[in-house]
Amino acid sequence: MNYFPRKRCVVPIDFSERAPEELKVAAQLVASPKDLYLIHVLSRAPDFDPTMSADPARDERRRETARSFMARRYARGPLSEANLEVRLGRPGREIPAYAVEVDADLLVISSRGLTGLDHERLGSVAEVVIRFAECPVLVLRD
């Protein structure tokens, strides 16, 4: 069974220093940068904060700002044809949903390998993505 190249590869971007490494690995697994689907998920305003009520115009500005930053930082040069998406919600749910929408056959995500209280407090987006993904997930670790 041949695993490479993949037709469509989703790469969650969290703007960390690990993002370029994720992109480098993912770019090696697809035939063309057009087959890369980069996604960043912005958190929604907390429901309990009355000063942060739902404002579609503000949310759209946040999405456009994040998308512009992604384009400037990651989707340039040989990756200029990569697809960019910015969503609002919970990353662990939005990332697998996006992978289904684009019919991805691989998700490439990094894990910081937190343990103990840090893991309990911060949770693991990678764990949730693995749990809900309908395609294989490649987890990159330090």
Image (cartoon, rainbow, N blue to C red):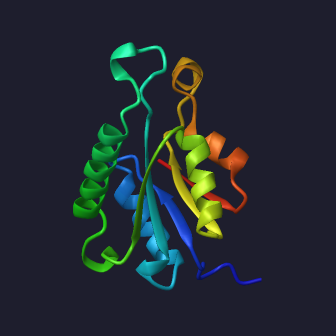
Tell me what residue is drawn at x 39 percent, y 24 percent. Answer: 53
Tell me what residue is drawn at x 53 percent, y 31 percent. Answer: 114
Percent x, y of residue 142: 47, 47
Percent x, y of residue 83: 42, 70
Q: How many marks?
A: 0
Q: Say which quarter of the image contains residue 103.
A: bottom right
Q: Say which quarter of the image contains residue 116.
A: top right
87 lies left or right of 68: right
Residue 139, placed above or below residue 93: below
Residue 41, placed above or below residue 47: below
93 lies left or right of 59: right
Residue 43, placed above or below residue 28: above
- Tell me, yes or no, if residue 126 can be seen here: no
Seen from the viewer's position, the closer of residues 44 and 132 is 44
Percent x, y of residue 7: 59, 80
**Farthest residue in the right direction?**
1
Seen from the viewer's position, the closer of residues 19 and 96 is 96
105 lies left or right of 29: right
| Quadrant showing the N terminus | bottom right
Tell me what residue is drawn at x 57 percent, y 74 percent. Answer: 8
Tell me what residue is drawn at x 30 percent, y 43 percent. Answer: 62
- Tell me, yes or no, if residue 15 can be seen here: yes
